[in-house]
Amino acid sequence: MGALLEVGTGFHPELTGRENIFLNGAILGMSRAEIKKKFDEIVAFAEVEKFLDTPVKRYSSGMYVRLAFAVAAHLDPEILLIDEVLAVGDAEFQKKCLEKMENVTTKEGRTVIFVSHNMDAICHLCSRCILLRQGEIAKTDNASDVVAAYLGGEQDQSPVIDFAAIDSEASFRFAGLYRSENEPTTSFSASEPILLNCSFKVRREIEGLQLSFSVFNFKGDRIFYSSASMAKPAISVEAAGEHHITALIPARLLLPGRYFISLALHTPKTKLYDVRKQALSFRIVATVTDRYDGFSGDDLGHVHADVKWRRIEPSRPQSTWISSKGNFISEFESRFAAYLGTRHAVGVCNGTAALHLALVTLGIGPGDEVIVPTLTYIAAANAIAYTGATPVFVDSRRDTWQMDPADVRRKINSRTKAIMVVHLYGHPCEMDALKEIVRERHLFLVEDSAEAFGARYQEQLVGTFGDMSAFSFYGNKTITTGEGGMIVTNSDPLAERARHFRGQGLAADREYWHDVIGYNYRMTNICAAIGLAQLERADEFLSKKRKLAQTYQQLLHGLPVEVHCEAANTTHSYWMTSILVENPAERDGLRVHLREKGIETRPLFYPAHMMPMYAADHQTYPVAEDLAQRGINLPSWPGLTASQLQTIVSSIAAYFGKSTPM
């Protein structure tokens, strides 16, 4: 099938959607037809489990490693190239993968090429190592020696430089890079401050003289720029003649690699007095200790990494480590999109903001109507109302509790612009029927997946069907950031518009210029840090919630309650395990009884059409109203113990005068 198999984090150019979830990367030497032919085999997870000898969780943070082994098991390539995949997953999984890779090479005689900054993995796995710089081979030797060269010395030039004098009214004299005041160096980790010290001389008073420096990578891309006035309003020879300034370069923004610094002395009107291109060079090295503590699933680990770094670098503006400019946000967005298999994810401050921003991005506004189920949390209807559009309510299906596609068809008219699908309590809606409707009537499809992270309809994750979809990371959600939300989409223009509106409508090419009425819906860096750690444990949480729901179903069997179960061809994420009592009059009595036992419950949502602001149409929705009157959400925390669960079920049984189920 081809001598070289590469599995990485890029998308195959000929495949889109769900296929790319499993074929992220490039399978060299295979045509699209060959890939398609092997697709079903590649995703045969039972085979992967057998090959790796460990349970496989789909869409987990280690999916690239699992994919690599899956493909290797089926295609038996001569060379398996794995790119940066062991930087994710928990420690136990990494150990299992390392052992398997070692077995593949030593016992099965295959060649594994491992491209990574993971120093532990490289030293453990690789017998021979190649260090590349600017695309050229810089060193080839045993792994430990090459890693030592990468982390240690081999500096291209001195960290300090004395400049030759030039005939100018202002000119540089000296520049140097320091880890601390008395420690010059050109090698830094991402957690260390980089101090740039410069001295320059002026011959006369120069109004508003500025020193600017730019940081470029080896490709010539400018990564960072800073400019500062040396005096207010001017510098004069009488003040000193030679002047000194110390600037801080934000190492945290830089990936491992080598960088150049160019310096310039100029005025705001761009008169240049002295320019020193590529005056200094330095590199950011990847160290084993630079990996986030939170990769093991420790929520506070990601936060601790940022807080610890700020203590090292106290002069760094807070906006780069806690607000919306930190690098955890983009990382969380990319990993969330990868988990779902979508092209884009846009982090926002909460789930309601995600819904509103999705509608704004789609151009929904006054005069438009959006169809939405009445049995839902009020945020769905409110988000529609925020835009000036009108929420049009539909009833629910009795079997699934989800919006009724037949009622959707009845409510469509010339003003209808979108259908907002709400996957209530974690159960998917009937997406085939709803997709058919939006195709026929040329409507937008918006998914409210706030309660349904991890749910599936016919094996496809919810949130991946719509033009735009919204998720919530509120404190009681399956994965949480305390407060937070996410929009996902496969449309490049929609993602760009969403980001534009999210940040107060700030223009991309003009500083502090706002060309639309936008919103302050940005996610904070600290929330994203928590979200990254939570995402790594997502499969664990989903598995525990599913097991909890199944145990509820078994223990409640025989009692006069109906557990909300999943329909055929769906996977319920069980954000909430919910029940219906037979008689509406029993619902509140049961809740009071459980509260007296110290057990908290919640009623099902009141239908939105019953709220004062939405009750003008005076319509009835019999299924939604009946479900709301009889429904209870039971404790659904994934950490619920067996004894706590037994207490809950025993208390429900006692209310109905039944013996404790066994």
Image (cartoon, rainbow, N blue to C red):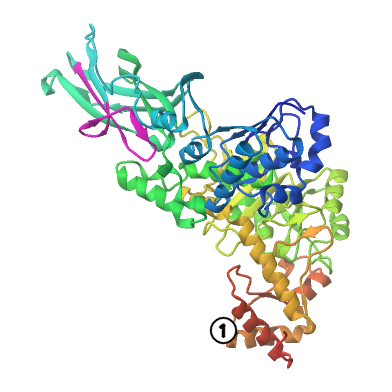
The residue to which callout 1 is attached is 598
> Which residue is painted at 69% across and 85% down in the image?
652
Please name the amino acid that badge 1 sits on.
Answer: Gly
**Above/below status of 122 relative to 431:** above
Region of the chain picked out in magenta, as a range: 177-201
Q: Is the magenta stretch mostly helix, strand or loop?
A: strand
User: Was residue 180 drawn as part of the magenta stretch in this picture?
Assistant: yes
Q: Is residue 359 visible?
A: no
Q: In the current view of this chain or complex, which residue is farthest to the top?
A: 167
> Which residue is painted at 43% across and 52% down in the image?
303
> Which residue is painted at 73% across and 69% down in the image?
607
> Which residue is painted at 73% across and 80% down in the image?
555
Is the residue marked by circle 1 packed among few (<14), some (14-19), or many (20+) residues within 10 Å?
few
Quarter of the rendering containing residue 39: top right
Looking at the rendered structure, the secondary structure element under dot 1 is loop
Q: Where is residue 372 in the image (x, y as percent from the top left)?
A: 75, 58
Q: Where is residue 135 in the image (x, y as percent from the top left)?
A: 51, 19
**Above/below status of 459 relative to 315:** below
Left or right: residue 302 compared with residue 405: left
Q: How many marks?
A: 1
Q: Which of these two is toward me, 253 or 404?
A: 253
